[in-house]
Amino acid sequence: MLWNKNFTLLAAANVFFHAAVYMQFPVLHRWMTDVWGYTGVEAACMAVVFGLSLFIPGVFNSYLVDTFSRKQVCIRSMIVLGLATLAYPWTSATWQIVALRVLQGSAFGIALMATGSTLAIDVAPSHQRDGANRAFTWSGIAGMLAGVVIGLAGMQHVAFTQLVSASACLLAVAMVLIGYVKISFRAPLDLPLCSSDRFLLFRAVPPGINMMAVPLVIGMLFVSVSDFSFYLCTGLGFLLYLLVRESVRRQVDGRIQVGAGQLLMIAGLMALHHPEGVYPLYIGGCLIGLGTGFSIGQFLQMMILLPLHCERGTGYHTYRLSWELAWACGIFLGVYLQSQGKGLFGAEILIAVAGLLLYQAFTYRYFKRHYQKH
């Protein structure tokens, strides 16, 4: 059974973990512009620093989880992430903020690897690991949306120090839940210090690059839409996808799923930029959530089927790194275009269309060719 006690604890921890991290994006951005006097672009650069920092510890991933206790690697990386979060109110120079973002990004990268790419696979039955990767991804998206809502709503009424404390508390809950997970003992392996294992699977990079079109648009929307009800509607649309996913997956080809997903996102963007009323905001959110589900579901499926034996964790982590980097770059791109007096609608549509065309022209064939080889 996939939803055993251990996997359920991990999935719940993943929701709290992502909520803790993603609530910091709006909170830190506002803090840097209001308190430190940064421009929007300068503050957005810190999001990119965070996204790039996920790659720093990557070459050590396999060594860490196969030399030390996997649970402890996960929990201690979250402790580092939480301590860095609590340190923001005490910073007195820009380099300190940069250092904290680098430290947070590195710790987040290790925790992502230790949870979704390692522990979630360890506790899942061998014949249900595809489902485990999908379910773990969905829990992360739920946590992401919850975190954005908490951050946007909270920063209107709550002081910055209280918000970073709340983020640290959410991390603490995630750590407690992970502490209750029972993992079978694994003898330490004699592995090299550096490798690409559990870091990047180069065979999965092309679909990963194509997939980045989705979080890139979502990151740009995060810049232009500050009404948290939009993200609640996005979550509702994503929930609708989860309800119909299984029946659609059995009857509809992957090409059609991505095509439908991207077209739904485009329709959502068009509704969102309707000039009148609040209903377009709600309709746009639902359509974007539904479209995100269809597109991401197929891209994720490709990236966990391309790995060879014992490469599943590496393929999944490649997906996670691609998502996080694209989200951060989407924030930067959105803020930069706004600073230049340009609207985001055209760029968002262009990225969504480019993602659709790239999938139909190249990525689908690439997947079929490389998947059939093994």
Image (spheres, grey):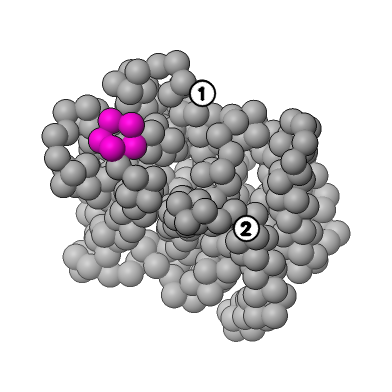
Q: Is 154 on the left-hand or right-hand side of 207?
A: left
- Quadrant housing the C terminus: bottom right
Tell whether position 329 is magenta. no
Going from N to C along the chain, the mark reached first, 1 or 2, is: 1
Question: Circle 2 — which element?
Answer: helix
| Amino acid at dot 2 | Glu
Determine the main secondary structure of the stretch shown in magenta. Answer: loop
Please name the residue that numbered disc 2 is placed on: 348
Q: Quadrant of residue 72?
A: top left
* Image position, residue 2 (x, y; %): 60, 41
Residue count near mark 1 (Cα–Cα under 10 Å), binned few <14, some 14–19, many ≥20: some
Q: Out of 131 and 43, give the one closest to the viewer.
A: 43
Q: Residue furthest front?
A: 341
Q: Residue furthest right?
A: 251
Please name the residue that numbered disc 1 is placed on: 153
Residue positioned 38% across, 33% down in the render: 30
Q: Is 129 on the left-hand or right-hand side of 103?
A: right
- Quadrant housing the N terminus: top right
Question: Circle 1 — which element?
Answer: helix
Q: How many numbered discs?
A: 2
Q: Is 258 on the left-hand or right-hand side of 342?
A: right
Q: Is 98 on the left-hand or right-hand side of 40?
A: left
Residue positioned 43% across, 35% down in the render: 26
Q: What range is drawn magenta here?
A: 33-37
